[in-house]
């Protein structure tokens, strides 16, 4: 049977990432759906995947395509490190990711690449056409408009001093939480990743408010 757009499992999704001092914080909801978000097919999807010792990718779009993309990016980063003796810089990894997205059949992919290297923290907005744009913060997926409103407010409030790591965790959780209130394709909790030069640490929360209330 041929897949139609409505039969493809998608993350629907709200994912965000933002730089904070010497780290990057990324967050994503945990819902997958079919039929344009009308039916929830999975309530515990990991939408953040480590692809490099100090980098992770958030996924939004067709689940199968993006799982394949994650495997490809991991393999390419590992091969690069084996040949050169060091992992790729974030700029090199972002260029590689953009090239692979442009070459591959990734339907409506909206990943975010987030990581840390010797130059500091980096956040890249990627698209299925191979576009690579670096920014201080990025949101993607069906809930991105709602998430961007929160991220802009939180980041502008602390523009003078810069976001601390804890403030970035709160901002990311609030952005995802705001999106899940209105976007039917986003929900079922939160995965939060903290990325530093020491690696990638991930936690899950059944309710994003667990994080925003504790740290507020």
Image: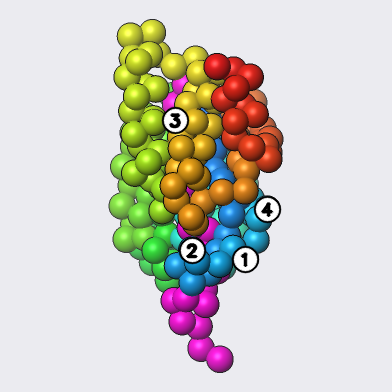
Helix, strand or loop at mark 2: loop
Q: Earlier in the sequence, mark 3 or mark 2?
A: 3
Whole-angstrom CA distance, mark 1 to mark 2, is 9 Å
Residue designated by label 1: 41
Of marks 3 and 1, which one's residue comes earlier in the chain? 3
Magenta-colored span:
1-22
Residue underneath mark 4 = 44
Please state the horizontal and vertical placement of residue 134, each as a whole percent of the image: 34, 37
Dot 3 alpha-carbon crowd within 10 angstroms: few under 14, some 14 to 19, many 20 or more: many
Report the residue at 53% width, 32% height from top: 173
Q: How many marks?
A: 4
**Foreground tag (3 vs 1):** 1
First in residue order: circle 3 vs circle 4: 3
Above or below, comparing residue 9 to residue 23 in the picture: below
Relative height, residue 96 to residue 197 (above, below)? below
Horizontal relation, residue 46 to residue 148: left or right? right
Disc 3 from disc 2: Cα separation:
26 Å
Earlier in the chain: of badge 2 and badge 4, it is 2
Residue at image point 57% right, 60% down = 32
């Amino acid at each position: 049977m041929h897949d139609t757009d409505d039969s493809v499992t998608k993350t629907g999704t709200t994912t965000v990432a933002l730089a904070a001092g010497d780290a990057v914080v990324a967050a994503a909801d945990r819902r997958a759906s079919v039929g344009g978000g009308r039916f929830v097919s999975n309530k515990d999807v990991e939408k953040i995947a480590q692809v490099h010792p100090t980098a992770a990718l958030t996924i939004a779009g067709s689940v199968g395509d993006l799982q394949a993309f994650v495997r490809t990016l991991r393999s390419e980063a590992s091969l690069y490190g084996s040949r050169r003796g060091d992992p790729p810089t974030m700029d090199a990894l972002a260029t590689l990711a953009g090239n692979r997205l442009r070459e591959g059949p990734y339907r409506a992919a909206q990943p975010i690449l987030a990581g840390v290297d010797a130059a500091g923290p980096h956040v890249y907005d990627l698209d299925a056409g191979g576009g690579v744009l670096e920014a201080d913060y990025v949101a993607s997926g069906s809930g991105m408009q709602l998430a961007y409103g929160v991220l802009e407010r939180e980041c502008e409030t602390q523009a003078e001093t810069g976001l601390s790591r804890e403030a970035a965790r709160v901002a990311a959780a609030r952005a995802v939480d705001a999106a899940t209130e209105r976007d039917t394709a986003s929900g079922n909790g939160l995965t939060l990743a903290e990325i530093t030069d020491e690696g990638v640490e991930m936690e899950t929360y059944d309710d994003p408010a667990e994080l925003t209330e504790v740290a507020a």
